[in-house]
Structures are given as C-alpha cells and as structure tokens.
Image: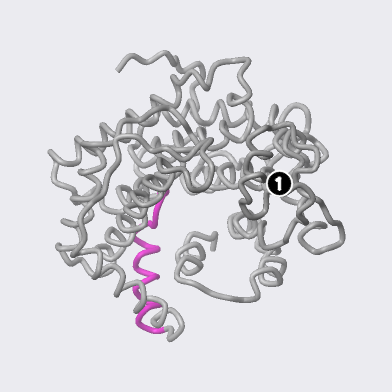
C-alpha cells in the first residue's frame, strides 16, 4: 500500500518493547476477572448471562460487509439498516474472544477467528472514521487472542486492520482545510488508528497518532472547556461524541506507558480534562442546555425532520447522555465515581466489570 505519511518525530519516551494487550484486557486483568467470577456473586450472575450469549454465538455465522455505511444516513435508510445488522458481529467477536481467554476452550477461539477472518476477507476500508469507529470490538477481540491465532489467518487479519488504519491516514477527509480533518471525525480517526497501532504493535501508526492527537487537542478543544463540535452543532451530544474517542485513545496510550493525554495542555491551554469537567454543571443539573437550536449542520436538521429521537431543536440535554464520557474519565480521576453513580443509579453491568478491570490500581 502506498503510504503518504512520513513520521516526523521520534518518541523516545514511549516504551514500546514488551507490553501485551493494552487495547483489551491484559493477562493479569483476565486473571482478576476469573477470580471475581469465582468469588463475587454479582459478577458471577453477570457472567452467566454473558456465557449464555457466547455459547449462542458458537452456532451463528459471520455476516460481513464489503463497506460499512452509517455516516450521513438517516434512520431507516436501507444501507444503514443492513450495516447495523452486520455490525452485530462486532460484539460477538469480542464475546467469543473474552470467553476463550476466560475458559481456554478452543472452540471459542476458532469461532472468533472465523468471524475476524470473514471480515478481513470481505470488508474494504473506505477511510470514513464514523464508519470505522464501529470496529472497536473487533480490534479488542484481535488484541485478546492475537497470540493464539494461527499464523496464516493472523496475517490476513492484521493486513485488514493495517489497511483500515492507513486508509484513514491517507483519506481525502483528512486533507487540510476540510472540516472532517479537525472535528469529531478526526477524534474518531485518531482512535481507530491508535487502537490498531497498539494492537498490532506498529510504532509508525502510534507515532502518527501521538503527533496528531496533540494537534487535535489544540485545534478542536478550547481553554474554556468547550469544543469546536459544540460550537458548530450547539449540542452537548457532539461535545460528548468528540470526547469519547479521545478518552478511549488516551486510556490506551496511558496503559502502554505513554504520555498522559488527559491532563496534557495544548499551546493554547486546552485539554481533554478541561473539556470533560466543563460538562459537570450540566450533568449535575446546575445548568441546562437546549440541543441543536443554532446548529450549522444540515444533517442535524434532516434528522429532526426524520423524527429521530433527541435531534429536535430545543430538546433538553439529559445527563445520562454523558455516561460514555464519565465511564471513561474515571480511569484518570476516580473522584468522578460519585458523579458517575449519581447518573447511572449504581446500575451495574458486565461491561462495567470489564471497564473497572482496566482502571488504575
């Protein structure tokens, strides 16, 4: 594949020699999960439901798409409906991979590889980060089982993931002067390239991600905590949609012993931390916001006309919409747990268990 990108910096401070899974769960974290399943009743109950699902997936067949199509399409669009049905494979892959790591039962590994290989052979990257962001569970599944994938299959899967990352980097949507090079699209692009880079142990992709994440924080986020996406869309929804991939990426980088991008401040004084904390008064109910009233984006108005929930101008922001950000930001600031609990109502889930295992000890 022709690569237009040339690495311009050397990140000597980034130790990248021998870490294992930082995108998914490490061996130590998997061992802790197994211990919790055995010794904690609540975790055991949640695992039993997960186990049933994983067992069901053994009897299902992959449903890969040549092209993922979600971005820019209204609810009900046949292409979007078809894509959403196929993307159910993503969570199946991750469940099968995790169940293999928990049980060491070869049948789960074989089935997960079957799903990954089907997508690797069929899916053609198109450089659209809003479509590619859906691949998170597939990358995590690969990261969980990469040491046990047969070499010939592993090569095909890695080629697919690598092509996905490089297609994002070389995409026309990345060119200077395009809004998609600096708005939420770029946040998702960085996350996609970064997670693939760390999963594949590809230093070139990682260097690109580090360099461009710094630029994105400087351009997209403001010192007062607001963001370019909030200004353009007049919606907390898009402020959150921008922060979520940046937080996911910052966690992966931190787990790989890289720079702390949560507190990192750009030359103009913006940071992920400031933009997360800017949300707090709205989450607590101290401030309110009417969504999309002054949006500059036609697609927002189109979704409102299509009667899609939450997109009508004047819809009040609901604190629960911030849960994706809170669940990730507690990794860096455990003090936010109380705010998270106040919004989530202390409701636990199997996904919560997985996320908690990744938290700093």
Taking the image as shown, residue 292 lies to the left or right of residue 257, namely: right
Q: Residue 53 appears in which quarter of the rendering? A: bottom left
- Foreground of the two, 180 or 75: 75
Q: Quadrant of residue 337?
A: bottom right
Report if residue 26 lies within the magenta region.
yes
Q: Is residue 256 above or below residue 26?
A: above
Considering the image in quadrants, where does the N terminus appear?
A: top left
Secondary structure of the residue carrying numbered label 1: helix
Residue 351 picture location, percent across and down: 47, 65
Residue sitting at x 61%, y 46%: 306
Q: In the image shown, does 167 or 359 lie closer to the viewer? A: 167
| Observer-nearest of 116 and 5 | 116
Q: Residue 216, position in %: x, y?
A: 63, 29
Residue 149 lies, with reference to residue 55, above or below; the image says above
Q: Position of residue 49 (x, y in %)?
A: 36, 76
Q: Label 1: few (<14), some or many (≥20) within 10 Å?
A: some
Q: How many marks?
A: 1
Colour scheme: one colour
Task: Using the image, determine if residue 265 lies above or below residue 24.
Answer: above
Image: magenta residue range: 22-39
What residue does disc 1 label?
A: 273
Residue 217 placement, left or right of 58: right
- Quick check: is 317 in the magenta stretch? no
């Amino acid at each position: 594949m022709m690569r237009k990108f040339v690495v311009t910096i050397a990140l000597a401070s980034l130790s990248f020699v021998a870490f294992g899974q930082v995108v998914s769960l490490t061996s130590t974290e998997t061992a802790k999960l197994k211990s919790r399943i055995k010794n904690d009743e609540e975790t055991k109950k949640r695992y039993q439901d997960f186990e049933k699902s994983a067992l069901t997936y053994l009897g299902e067949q992959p449903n890969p798409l040549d092209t993922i199509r979600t971005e820019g399409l209204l609810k009900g669009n046949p292409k979007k409906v078809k894509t959403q049905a196929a993307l159910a494979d993503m969570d199946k892959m991750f469940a099968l991979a995790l169940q293999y790591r928990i049980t060491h039962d070869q049948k789960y590994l074989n089935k997960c590889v079957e799903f990954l290989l089907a997508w690797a052979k069929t899916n053609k990257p198109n450089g659209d980060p809003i479509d590619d962001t859906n691949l998170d569970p597939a990358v995590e599944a690969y990261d969980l089982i990469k040491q046990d994938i047969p070499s010939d299959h592993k090569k095909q899967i890695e080629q697919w993931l690598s092509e996905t990352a490089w297609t994002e980097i070389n995409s026309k949507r990345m060119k200077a002067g395009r809004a998609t090079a600096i708005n939420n699209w770029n946040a998702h692009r960085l996350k996609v390239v970064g997670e693939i880079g760390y999963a594949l142990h590809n230093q070139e992709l990682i260097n690109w991600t580090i360099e461009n994440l710094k630029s994105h924080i400087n351009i997209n986020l403001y010192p007062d905590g607001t963001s370019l996406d909030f200004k353009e869309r007049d919606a907390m929804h898009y402020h959150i949609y921008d922060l979520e991939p940046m937080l996911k990426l910052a966690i992966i980088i931190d787990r790989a012993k890289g720079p702390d991008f949560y507190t990192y401040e750009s030359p103009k004084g913006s940071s992920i931390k400031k933009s997360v904390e800017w949300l707090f008064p709205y989450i607590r109910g101290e401030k309110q916001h009417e969504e999309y009233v002054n949006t500059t984006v036609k697609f927002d108005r189109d979704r409102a006309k299509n009667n899609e929930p939450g997109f009508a101008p004047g819809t009040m922001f609901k604190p629960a919409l911030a849960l994706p950000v809170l669940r990730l930001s507690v990794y860096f600031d455990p003090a936010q747990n109380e705010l998270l609990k106040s919004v989530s109502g202390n409701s636990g889930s199997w996904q919560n268990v997985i996320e908690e295992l990744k938290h700093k000890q």
